[in-house]
Each structure stands twice: as C-alpha cells, then as structure tokens.
Image (spheres, helix red, strand yellow):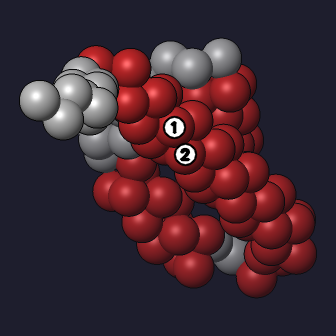
C-alpha cells in the first residue's frame, strides 16, 4: 500500500469515527496514534516528487483529526449533562420544614 493510500485510508477511518461519535456511539481510538505515526514516518521517507501531494493529504488528515476531536468533545459534554440530569433526578428532596410550633 502506498503512503498516499495509507493516508486516504486513515482519513476515511477518522471520518467514520467522527460520524459514529456524532451519532452517540463509543469510538475506539486504540492504535490510532500508532497508525498515524507509521503514516508520518512513511511520508517523511517518501520520494521528494510525492511530498507535495502527501502534504495535502496530511493537511486533510489533520482536519479530520480536528473534527473528530470536536465530535468527541461534544459527545463527552452531552454525556456529562445526561449524567448530571440523572443524578439530579435521583437525588431525594429534603423533608419539608414543619410549621408545627406545638
């Protein structure tokens, strides 16, 4: 697989992860950092004639990472709000003060 194909595959995977996160699904990021590091090493080792095209793909990959991070941030925020609302509903109300002065 060429470096360009690897970068395109990573960008597509990131787009799928973003879509899943926006739908509320849990996203498994295991191995993502290693895959990106491998692609970067391969891009650095690519012939000079391919680097301009690879640079554009790397910029796209960075954009996909940014949008995935934003989607995951929204998902985490929504989850925090849901947990807070559930905790609020589950908290019993204190007993009403009695006005019985007997």
- Give me the C-alpha separation between circle 2 and circle 1: 6 Å
| Callout in the foreground (2, 1) | 1
Q: Is residue 60 above or below residue 74?
A: below
Q: Secondary structure at mark 1?
A: helix
Image quadrant where one finds the N terminus: top right
Residue at position x 87%, y 66% in the image = 56
Picture quarter containing residue 33? bottom left
Residue 44 in picture, x, y percent from top left: 57, 79
Residue at position x 11%, y 29% in the image = 102
Residue at position x 46%, y 29% in the image = 85
Residue 83 in picture, x, y percent from top left: 38, 31
Q: Secondary structure at mark 2?
A: helix
For mark 1, what is the residue? 81
In the image shown, does 41 or 50 lie closer to the viewer?
A: 41
Of all residues shown, which one is farthest toward the front? Answer: 102
Q: Is residue 93 above or below residue 38?
A: above
In the image shown, does 43 or 12 lie closer to the viewer?
A: 12
The answer to the question of whether label 2 and label 1 lie on touching residues, with beta carbons closer than 8 A, is yes
The numbered dot on residue 77 is 2
Visible residue check, residue 39 = yes
The numbered dot on residue 93 is none
Residue 48 relative to residue 32: left or right: right
Visible residue check, residue 4 = no
Residue 57 in picture, x, y percent from top left: 80, 59
């Amino acid at each position: 697989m060429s470096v360009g194909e690897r970068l395109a595959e990573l960008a597509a995977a990131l787009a799928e992860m973003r879509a899943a996160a926006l739908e509320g699904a849990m996203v498994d990021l295991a191995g993502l950092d290693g895959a990106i590091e491998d692609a970067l090493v391969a891009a650095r080792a690519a012939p000079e004639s391919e680097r301009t095209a690879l640079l554009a793909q790397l910029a796209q990959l960075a954009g996909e990472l940014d949008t995935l991070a934003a989607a995951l941030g929204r998902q985490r925020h929504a989850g925090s709000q849901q947990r807070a609302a559930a905790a609020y509903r589950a908290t019993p109300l204190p007993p009403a003060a009695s006005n019985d002065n007997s």
